[in-house]
Image (cartoon, rainbow, N blue to C red):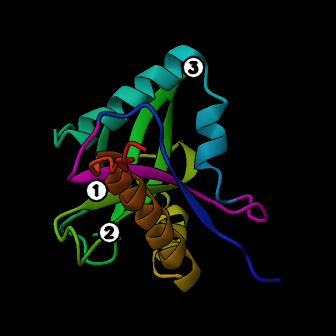
């Protein structure tokens, strides 16, 4: 059976023309669980995680809350957001990509894929393997492009001047 992927932008974030943040969805995969874990967080913890998302969206650097691996060839497109729940380290893993290469070459979106509790000092290689496999999967790439072409179209319609028709008097 072939998996069906979709991508949904995360609501409630600061607006940015340079960065976006989204969840990958796939109903027949238990590994793709970042959205369901995020949605199950308490309101307070969800606000804390959302503020970390906003820090990244706004271009801030804070390795305590999130980071990539830009100097590691096999991890350079992987990304992680970090938080604690009941004193246990939690991780939301995803990948960086640009679904709008023609219209916005510097745009970057982080597509969050999976959640795990970190129990060792090193990142779980299985998580990064999953992320790397999915970020190049043709169906995932298409889902990301589709999601961001839809968002771009909605933005253009929202900012387009309204046309009115003038009716002549009879």
> Relative to the observer, which residue lies in front, 98 or 32?
98
Mark closer to the chain start, 2 or 3:
2
Question: Where is residue 106 drawn, in percent x and y?
Answer: 16, 65
Residue at (43% x, 44% y) in the render: 170
Q: Where residue 79 sits in the image (x, y, percent)?
A: 36, 56
User: Number of callouts in the render?
Assistant: 3
Is disc 2 in contact with disc 3, using a CB cutoff of under 8 Å? no
Q: Is residue 48 above or below residue 147?
A: above
Helix, strand or loop under label 2? loop
SS state under label 1: strand
Distance from disc 3 to disc 1, alpha carbons, whole Å, reads 25 Å
* Lower sequence index among marks 2 and 1: 1
User: Are the two marked residues, 2 and 1, in contact with CB atoms closer than 8 angstroms?
Assistant: yes
Does the magenta-highlighted stretch encompass residue 23? yes
**Relative to 22, is 117 above or below?**
above
Q: Report which residue position mark 1 lands on.
A: 68
- The residue depicted at 67 percent of the width and 60 percent of the height is 31
Label disc, if present, on residue 86 of the rendered structure: 3
Q: Specify the label residue 77 is tagged with.
A: 2
Camera-side residue of 170 and 46: 170
Q: Is residue 64 visible?
A: no
- Give the magenta part as a residue range: 15-30
Residue at the right extreme?
A: 1
Residue 21 placed where, x, y %? 39, 49
Residue at image position (26%, 52%) is 19
Q: CA distance from mark 2 to mark 1?
A: 7 Å
The quadrant of the image that shows the N terminus is bottom right
Marks 3 and 1, the one that precedes in the sequence: 1
Q: Single out the residue that lies furthest toward the front.
A: 170
With 156 as the anchor, is 46 left or right in this view?
right
């Amino acid at each position: 059976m072939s998996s069906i992927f979709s991508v949904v932008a995360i609501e409630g974030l600061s607006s940015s023309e340079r960065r976006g943040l989204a969840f990958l969805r796939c109903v027949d995969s238990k590994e793709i669980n970042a959205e369901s874990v995020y949605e199950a967080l308490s309101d307070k913890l969800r606000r804390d995680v959302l503020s970390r998302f906003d820090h990244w969206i706004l271009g801030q650097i804070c390795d305590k809350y999130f980071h990539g691996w830009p100097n590691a060839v096999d991890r350079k497109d992987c990304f992680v957001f970090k938080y604690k729940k009941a004193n246990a380290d939690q991780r939301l893993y995803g990948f960086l990509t640009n679904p709008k290469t023609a219209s916005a070459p510097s745009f970057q979106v982080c597509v969050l894929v999976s959640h795990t509790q970190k129990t060792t000092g090193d990142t779980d290689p299985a998580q990064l393997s999953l992320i790397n496999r999915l970020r190049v999967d043709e169906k995932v790439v298409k889902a990301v492009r589709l999601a961001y072409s839809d968002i771009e179209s909605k933005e253009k319609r929202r900012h387009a001047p309204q046309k009115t028709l003038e009716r002549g008097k009879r």
